[in-house]
Image (tube, grey):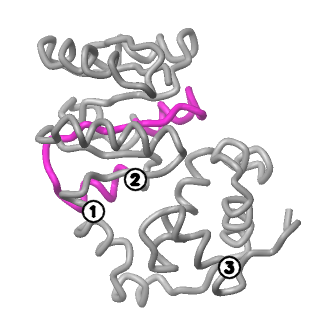
């Protein structure tokens, strides 16, 4: 994956670039200090992954991640954030990111995150996984939102089962990349699973998969 690292602190940015250069899933790396210098690079360099500094003031503004999604709809986003606040992480995923790592993450977390992103999965580190999964599968949240799967969610689920990528699903259903990821998050929450593999399992167990639905 071609990776654009957007990190405000030069020393940390250089360390991240060095770390990523040695990872088997990374084919090229490029650094930028802020969104102003990074945005012009998106159409020209077309990164597969954006490593985004969650401490940048502009990143905390909801429209920035959506702006990235519009400019580079096929690019995956990892937020390198300052803490482990579930509401904050939830907000990032709702905007369409694919992974979250706190700045206290160890090198093994980085490797796991990149492996997960490379295979099309969402990722949070093990240290946050239990809390984050509890948020996704909390029965009170299900009660508030309702567990009924919509027709559009059934279509997305069937395409996930058929191993289509997020980009392919977006094209087939004529919706945005971000919307597909939102449906995926909603399905994970409604079906009470932890990841995409869980969605596939429950789709078959509950008879939710309809071959040729699209």
Q: Can you say which quadrant of the picture contains the C terminus?
A: bottom right
Q: Secondary structure at mark 1?
A: helix
Looking at the image, is mark 2 or mark 1 nearer the viewer? Answer: 1
| Residues at circles 2 and 1 in contact by the CB criterion of under 8 Å | no
Instruction: Please tell me which residue is depicted at 28% across the width and 15% down the height of the picture.
Output: 17
User: Looking at the picture, how far across and down is residue 203, in whole percent?
Assistant: 65, 77
Residue 109 falls in which quadrant of the image?
Answer: top left
Q: CA distance from mark 2 to mark 1?
A: 14 Å
Q: Is residue 6 magenta?
A: no
Q: CA distance from mark 3 to mark 1?
A: 25 Å
Q: Secondary structure at mark 3?
A: helix
Say which quarter of the image contains residue 207.
Answer: bottom right
Q: CA distance from mark 3 to mark 2?
A: 26 Å
Residue bearing the label numbered 3: 204
Q: Label 1: how many residues lie within 10 Å, few (<14), some (14-19) or many (20+)?
A: few
Query: Residue 88 — which label?
Result: none
Pointers 3 and 1 in contact (CB under 8 A)? Answer: no
**Residue 100 coordinates in the image, percent (x, y):** 30, 46
Q: Position of residue 64 (x, y in %)?
A: 39, 34
Are the residues tagged 3 and 2 within 8 Å (C-beta)?
no
**Where 11 falls versus 170 (above or below)?**
above
For marks 2 and 1, the one nearer the N-term is: 2
Q: Quadrant of residue 136?
A: bottom left
Q: Which residues are magenta?
A: 65-93
Assess disc 3: are there few (<14), some (14-19) or many (≥20) residues with their C-alpha within 10 Å of its C-alpha. Answer: few
Q: Residue under circle 2?
A: 93
**Which residue shows up at 28% across the image and 65% down it?**
132
**SS at mark 2?**
helix
Q: Nearer the viewer, residue 207 or 34?
A: 207
Q: Residue at x 63, y 47 (%)?
A: 166
Determine which of the numbered discs, if any, sits on residue 129 in the image. Answer: 1
């Amino acid at each position: 994956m071609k990776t654009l690292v957007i990190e405000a602190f030069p020393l940390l940015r250089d360390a991240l670039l060095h770390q990523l250069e040695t990872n088997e899933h990374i084919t090229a790396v490029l650094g930028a200090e802020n969104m102003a210098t990074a945005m012009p690079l998106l159409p020209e360099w077309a990164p597969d992954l954006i490593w985004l500094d969650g401490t940048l003031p502009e990143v905390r503004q909801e429209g920035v991640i959506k702006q990235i999604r519009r400019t580079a709809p096929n690019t995956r986003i990892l937020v390198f954030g300052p803490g482990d606040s579930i509401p904050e992480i939830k907000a990032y995923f709702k905007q369409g990111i694919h992974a979250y790592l706190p700045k206290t993450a160890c090198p093994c977390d980085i490797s796991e995150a990149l492996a997960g992103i490379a295979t099309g999965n969402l990722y949070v580190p093990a240290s946050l996984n239990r809390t984050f999964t509890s948020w996704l599968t909390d029965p009170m949240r299900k009660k508030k939102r309702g567990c009924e799967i919509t027709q559009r969610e059934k279509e997305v689920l069937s395409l996930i089962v058929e191993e289509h990528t997020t980009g392919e699903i977006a094209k087939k259903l004529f919706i945005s990349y971000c919307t597909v990821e939102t449906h995926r998050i909603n399905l994970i929450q409604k079906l009470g699973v932890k990841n995409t593999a869980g969605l596939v399992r429950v789709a078959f167990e509950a008879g939710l998969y309809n071959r040729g639905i699209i």
